[in-house]
Image (cartoon, grey):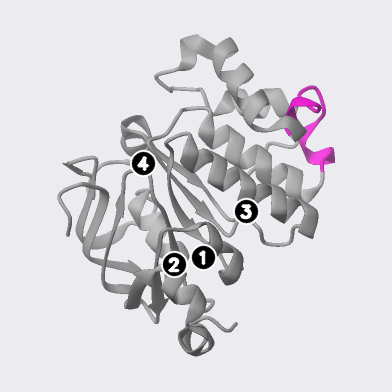
Amino acid sequence: MSEDAMLTVDNLNAWYGPSHILQGVSFEVKAGEIVTLIGRNGAGKTTSLRTIMGLVGKRTGSVAFDGQEILDQPAFRRFHLGLGYVPEDRRIVGGLTVLENIRLGLIASRHARQERAVIDRIAETFPRLKQRLTQQADTMSGGEQQMLAIARAMASDPKLIMMDEPSEGIMPVLVDEMFELFQAMKRAGTTVLLVEQNVERALQVSDRAYIMDQGVIVHHDTAAALLADTDIQDRYCSV
């Protein structure tokens, strides 16, 4: 593993009850990269993100973030260190406005006292949300709610943000906006670990990718090389 990695996962194992889901998973994400985990449903991608975030109880191995071992740290501590997470189910609070949902991302954040500046930054980054700050969150489309989930995670200014299937169930025009957003986040210096079923789009914006199958990493290469390797995609990424 590289000394300049922001996130280093080494021999990670995780269980749900008696089921051994992750079996010796190792990968890394360097500062400023977009790295994607791809593979079929059930390959262990979501479990990898949940374990890194501290949401899976039984695990062994090593997860080092920004030079610090965090495997046994609680999830809130990982958040304080600068690790952001957007789960697949978004978890938007429907009874609150867009602005109030974004404010939730500032609770316990080191930027909590800079709310106005944070809201202004989020509004500029997410122009679609800027027009809807006073709108009740659950009245927006699925794609807009997904953008809100990302904006809420970005409010704490994470060093690395993990996103699980952000384009799932979203209309194509918003998918385009979302992947443009990922590239803008990278240009702004945010590091991204992405789980995404839209393999082609994910590889187009990524630096590198790891392919998972049945709880293990089976292949790793640059995103450009994997984008050109249709045999590998057909073997491991077809749903």
Q: Quadrant of residue 62?
A: bottom left
Q: Which label sits in the foreground, 4 or 1?
A: 1
> Which residue in the protein does label 2 denote?
223
The tag earlier along the polypeptide, 4 or 2, is: 4
Quarter of the N terminus within the rendering = bottom left
Give SS at disc 1.
helix
State the CA–CA distance, disc 1 to disc 3: 22 Å
State the CA–CA distance, disc 4 to disc 1: 29 Å
Q: Residue at x 43, y 38 (%)?
A: 190
> Which residue in the protein does label 1 denote?
203
Q: Disc 2 residue type?
A: Ala
Q: Report the span colored magenta.
A: 129-140
Q: Is residue 63 above or below residue 226?
A: above
Q: Disc 4 residue type?
A: Ala
Q: Residues within 10 Å of mark 4 (few under 14, many from 20)?
A: some
Q: Which label sits in the foreground, 1 or 3?
A: 1
The tag earlier along the polypeptide, 4 or 1, is: 4
Residue 182 position within the rendered picture, expressed as x and y whole percent measured from the top left: 56, 47
> Which residue in the protein does label 4 denote?
75
Q: Residue at x 76, y 24 (%)?
A: 133
Q: Residue at x 61, y 19 (%)?
A: 119
Residues 146 and 4: in front is 4
The answer to whether residue 98 is magenta is no
Q: Residues within 10 Å of mark 2 (few under 14, many from 20)?
A: many
Decide: marks 4, 2 in contact (CB < 8 A)?
no
Left or right, 190 with respect to 13, comes to: right
Q: Disc 1 residue type?
A: Leu
